[in-house]
């Protein structure tokens, strides 16, 4: 995986598609916020895409030290195992809609939630769109639970008009 900074989402997707046509696997894996995406795939695909991203004007194409090609087709074997576990788990109707990064939309139907959780493993994380949909549906305050401030920074870059802070 590699973080791509300072290049339009559409250009990152275009370059990933171009590199993939050569037989190397690379996809846009995480749409974190405008100008910040993460790509995933084979090492050869990532390397080729990073070179093209830099040539296209990316400020940075930074390889990430991770244990897998998350949110890419290379996660299919793990997806198969996850699917069995999720399908054997009983889900109840949630008390509020669950925004899922698979399609960035709110869901309340347990079978939809299950299907989207399974699909998420090999699909892009649509964080930017998820936050935009939450805001469009009335969210105006976001709290990041846990260590760090990464999500706070991303949400602030997605829409600076909302309140964003860490758990206290």
Image (cartoon, helix red, strand yellow):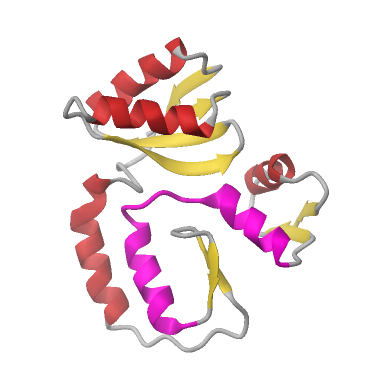
On the image, which quarter does residue 131 sit in?
bottom right
Q: Measured along the vertical axis of the image, is residue 47 above or below residue 25?
A: above
Which quadrant of the rendered structure holds the C terminus? bottom right
Residue 117 in magenta stretch: yes
Q: Can residue 83 be seen in the rendering of this structure?
A: yes
Q: Can residue 64 be seen in the rendering of this structure?
A: no
Percent x, y of residue 26:
30, 34
On the image, which quarter does residue 141 sit in?
bottom right
Percent x, y of residue 158:
69, 44
Say whether residue 36 is left or right of residue 114. Answer: right
Percent x, y of residue 103:
47, 60
On the image, which quarter does residue 134 sit in?
bottom right
Which residue sits at x=37%, y=25%?
15
Magenta stretch: give its range.
Answer: 109-137
Residue 85 in magenta stretch: no
Which residue sits at x=61%, y=36%?
34
Predominant secondary structure, magenta span: helix
Which residue sits at x=24%, y=31%?
20
Q: Measured along the vertical axis of the image, is residue 10 above or below residue 129?
A: above
Which residue sits at x=20%, y=64%?
80
Percent x, y of residue 108:
52, 81
Q: Measured along the vertical axis of the image, is residue 89 above or below residue 69?
A: below
Which quadrant of the rendered structure holds the N terminus? top left
Say whether residue 38 is left or right of residue 131. Answer: left
Mark count = 0
């Amino acid at each position: 995986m590699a973080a791509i900074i300072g290049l339009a989402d559409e250009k990152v997707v275009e370059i990933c598609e171009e590199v993939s046509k050569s037989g190397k696997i690379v996809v846009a894996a995480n749409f974190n916020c405008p100008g910040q995406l993460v790509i995933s795939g084979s090492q050869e695909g990532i390397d080729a895409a990073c070179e093209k991203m830099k040539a296209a004007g990316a400020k940075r194409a930074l390889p990430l030290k991770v244990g897998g090609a998350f949110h890419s087709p290379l996660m299919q074997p793990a997806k198969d195992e996850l699917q069995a576990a999720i399908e054997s788990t009983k889900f109840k109707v949630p008390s509020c809609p669950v925004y899922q990064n698979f399609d960035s939309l709110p869901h309340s139907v347990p079978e939809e939630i299950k299907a989207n959780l399974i699909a998420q493993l090999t699909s892009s994380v649509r964080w930017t769109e998820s936050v935009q949909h939450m805001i469009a549906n009335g969210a105006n305050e976001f709290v990041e639970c846990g260590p760090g401030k990464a999500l706070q920074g991303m949400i602030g870059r997605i829409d600076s008009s909302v309140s964003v802070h860490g758990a206290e």
